[in-house]
Image (spheres, helix red, strand yellow):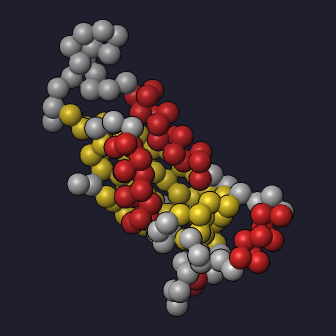
Amino acid sequence: MYFLKTKASFDSAHFLHAYSGKCANLHGHHWVIEAEFSGEHLQDSGECRGMLLDFSNLKKSVRNLAEDFDHALIYEKNSLKPSTESALLSEDFKLITVEFRPTAENFARHFYEKLLDKGLPIHRVTVYETPDNCASYEV
């Protein structure tokens, strides 16, 4: 089995709604998405001969996921008061509403599913919210 790994990062803010710890407050992270792809056979012809996949395509796919979330406030649907959301939007802040609690665990699954939807042979996605803390998702 062959494995390829690439990373991309983004900076964003989030908070955990209905949480009793410090993470209930708005705070930011330098998130890192680490995506691992796998396959049993290398390509045997064409310009990608001897490769599982072209790294440039993998890097672009993961980088695009990161860029979508970069410098935004990411929050769970219905976790902000409508007046707060309206005020932030009126200031032209980049807001991203997600259907899940924005944890490293849920981001790992979200990015895994996005890469799978692109038809890529994704093996595992690991999301770091700090250099020492991460969550992984694989099927």
Task: Judge left or right: residue 50 versus residue 132.
Answer: left
Q: Nearer the viewer, residue 22 or 112?
A: 112
137 in relation to 52, above or below:
below
Residue 39: image quadrant is top left
Q: Nearer the viewer, residue 30 or 14?
A: 14
Residue shown at 23% from the left, 54% from the top: 139
Work out which residue is located at the far bottom of the displayed protein and give it.
20
Task: Judge left or right: residue 92 versus residue 16.
Answer: right
Residue 91: image quadrant is bottom right
Residue 3: image quadrant is top left
Image coordinates for residue 23, horizontal then vertical, percent: 56, 80
Image coordinates for residue 27, horizontal then vertical, percent: 64, 72
Residue shown at 33% from the left, 59% from the top: 136
Residue shown at 77% from the left, 63% from the top: 89
Task: Judge left or right: residue 81 versus residue 133.
Answer: right
Image coordinates for residue 109, horizontal then vertical, percent: 37, 58
